[in-house]
Amino acid sequence: MLLLLLILGIPLSIWLHRPWRLQLVSRPLMGYLARAMPPLSATEQEAIDAGSVWWEGQLFGGQPDWRQLMDLPKPSLSEEEQAFLTHQVDELLSRLAALPGNPNQVDLPDEIWRYLAQEGFFALIIPKAYGGREFSHYANSQIVARIAAANLSAAVTVMVPNSLGPAELLLHYGTQAQQDYWLPRLARGEEIPCFALTGPEAGSDAGAIPDLGVVTRGQWQGNEVIGIRLNWNKRYITLAPRASVIGLAFKLNDPDHLLGEQEEYGISCALIPANLPGVQIGDRHLPMGQRFLNGPIRGEDVFIPLESLIGGIEWAGKGWRMLVECLSAGRGISLPALGTACGQLACRTSSAYAFVRQQFGQPIGRFEGVQESLARIAGLSYQMDAARQLTTTALDLGARPGVATAIAKYHITESARRCLLDAMDIHAGRAIMLGRSNYLAYHYMGIPIAITVEGANILTRSLMIYGQGAVRCHPFLRQEMACLQQAEGLAEFDGLLRQHVSRFARHLLLTLVSGLTLGRLDSAPSKGYPAGYYRQLTRMSRALALTSDLVMLLLGGRLKRRELLTARLGDWLSQLYLASATLKRFADEGSAEQDRLLLDYAMQHSLQQIGLAVVGVCANLPWPWLGWLLKRWIFPFGNGYAGPRDRLIAQLAQALLIPDGLRQRLLTLHHCPQQEQDPVGRVELAFMQLYAVAPLHERLQQAQKQGQLPTKVPMAKLIEPALALGLLSAAEAAALQEAERLRYLALQVDSFAASDLERGAWPGG
Ligand SMILES: Cc1cc2nc3c(=O)[nH]c(=O)nc-3n(C[C@H](O)[C@H](O)[C@H](O)COP(=O)(O)OP(=O)(O)OC[C@H]3O[C@@H](n4cnc5c(N)ncnc54)[C@H](O)[C@@H]3O)c2cc1C
């Protein structure tokens, strides 16, 4: 007893008696942490400071308030936004569908460019006062998604002027004069913008750009003025070959002190007319055979006045902050929209094709192997759209959640890639042969673009989601880090430490209780289905909070370099976000019975990914015994998150092989013209007709079993004999003939005369 009293009593007395705690715990710990914590670079600090913390903060903190999530408004469109979608966007899609195919074409035709400019597609985010559309982020996302499902190149062309670029930067940082001059011109489509940051030497590490602007005197419109002489070399710049105004990021130096004491200002942004002497623009890259414009831009001794700096001289050197702030919000809009659209395209075409294509005497969608891919496409598509909607809701509510938008960008584009891979596998040869009939291959080829831009995905997963998330979302960490940098910060640090330790103790205890009770006592906003999923998420959120504190304590600043660990912790946080978005969507859409299969799939998938992340983190902690203990603490009875069950996979895949119902509810963004001329329309029509005549197929198969009709012959060959035997009426026989005709049409791929290929033309191109 005495020994026990000493072991527990001494540390407890020290902890509870503030003067002792200050001297014996807080001061030495503060010293240790100050030495262990590597200094943050200015660019890292700005990335961490950009934007705000939103719902993901609660998931990270271990105490998600589900009511708060459920009370968020369901995203919706205004009448004007809805009208734009049904008129301008649909008209654009019809014009795009009518374009002749030509693999050598590297741009959209002028007629499409004119239509985009005239209808304000480049002005979705520009306020009405400047002649723009002033649409919500959600509407912007709906528009991009609807276009992207049909045509990636057109979507990228529309996306760029409405995401990180001159308009966005001017809206946030431009001077009144800059806004008044540029925004109306951009809104009318008189100016085509591009934004140039990346160069041969600096891609992901954009803070390292070598492009230089030197403050000097020069001639501008016949007068000598103080301005900036620029030299740059940029590449991969979208819309550059046609751009009339370049948003340029460069480092600003003032060696002659024409502006003041400071010599090096750092990254700055300016707007540069593309026709200035010294600007070399017009060459093209060929990004994965897509038709949008992309190319290098170089500038040699280009002189601009100081007024060209975005935001004026006060914003000189604050370019990195501008970019990170805009990017951290913009990442949650265009690319998630594009990814969701790819998911829906994969879903529509794969489900239709899996019914239309028959092998071994039945639709391939009835084989379990194909069902696995089909169900994954459907479950992920449901989840992707949910995350897209939740993230744009946050942005429309005025939040700028850098971590949530990074999660949306990374996971939605990765899920899109997964869905397109599955769709390619299901279609096999049908999706490999290029040509106009191929509705998948061009999206499949284009998806690496979404993976690469606005923060390449490996970097986003490894560094941004958790690396920034941990510092941003943790309730105390940022303040604690700030204290470490102040000599007088001991008292404040001690207060934070006390709260931090009590939070840790609470999570330690509750994680074990949740594990032992399998989360049955955890919180959920309602009873019955799907309360169990909420409880599991609460349980895993708390376990993440506990693990984060442990990992940070053990590794301190070294965690920054343990990217595999931060990637897994990021997956854990991300799946909590994606799963909670899915629950929110399910509730927003009326908790419909028919959506349960989709929700079940998405939730079981997310929990499985969380389980894998937990096991991966525990297996790689610096002290193996601690990892062993932590895993058993979180999962006392083992990791039960096995992923979607076979029965669920089969049920979901079967539901997709029915044209309406669940499939219809899922495909809200994909526009499908029900016409034979349209490649997707063709397979869709075949699916619907074949589905409608399925009872007749069964009747004929029955007759085959009874020996009335021959076996091992194609369906088309049974129609005539069945009609003659009176097994079919004339109308039924005609419906079957039509279905067989459509099926045959839907299975066709393109082939070309060698002479056409030599000319670089497709049929009709
Ligand atoms: C089609 C297209 C359009 C584009 N449009 C524009 C545009 O309009 N304007 C513009 O300025 N730029 C544009 N870009 C550039 C784009 O932003 C860059 O390609 C991107 O930042 C990545 O740079 P990089 O290609 O040089 O790859 P790198 O930076 O060389 O990265 C290579 C790989 O290493 C990974 N990586 C790098 N650092 C780390 C790290 N610390 N931890 C883990 N992984 C890491 C990356 O994730 C990536 O997988 C475009 C690119 C493409 C492909």
Image (spheres, grey):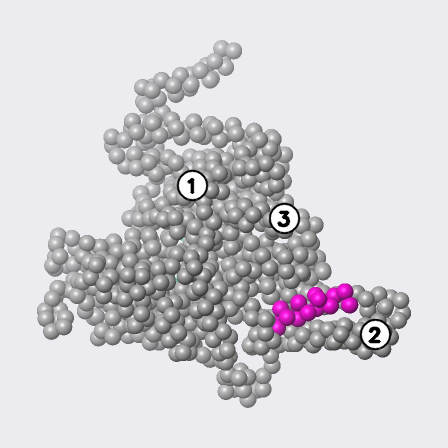
- In this picture, which residue range is highlighted in magenta? 682-697
Judge left or right: residue 348 versus residue 563: right
Q: Are marks 1 and 3 in contact (CB under 8 Å)?
A: no
Q: Position of residue 342 (x, y in %)?
A: 52, 62
Residue pushed farthest front? 79
Judge left or right: residue 652 versus residue 715: left
Q: Distance between the Cα atoms at labels 1 and 2? A: 66 Å
Residue occupying the point 54% across, 60% down: 668
Q: Quadrant of residue 334?
A: bottom left
Judge left or right: residue 313 versus residue 223: right
Residues 500 and 691: in front is 691
Which of labels 1 and 2 is toward the front? 2
Main secondary structure found in the magenta portion: helix
Sequence order check, earlier mark of 1 and 2: 1
Q: If the picture is divided into quarters, which one holds ligand 1?
A: bottom left
Sequence order check, earlier mark of 2 and 3: 3
Residues 66 and 622: in front is 66
Q: Position of residue 121 (x, y in %)?
A: 38, 67
Sequence order check, earlier mark of 1 and 3: 1
> Can residue 232 be spotted in the picture?
no
Which of labels 1 and 3 is toward the front? 3
Q: Are marks 2 and 3 in contact (CB under 8 Å)?
A: no
Residue occupying the point 33% across, 20% down: 18
Residues 565 and 78: in front is 78
Q: Which residue, given by chain and number where applicable, does mark 2 sit on?
A: 722
Instruction: Assess disc 1: are there few (<14), some (14-19) or many (≥20) residues with their C-alpha within 10 Å of its C-alpha.
Output: many
Residue pushed farthest right? 707
Q: Which residue, given by chain and number where applicable, does mark 3 sit on?
A: 593
Residue pushed farthest top? 2
Mark 1 belongs to which amino acid?
Gly
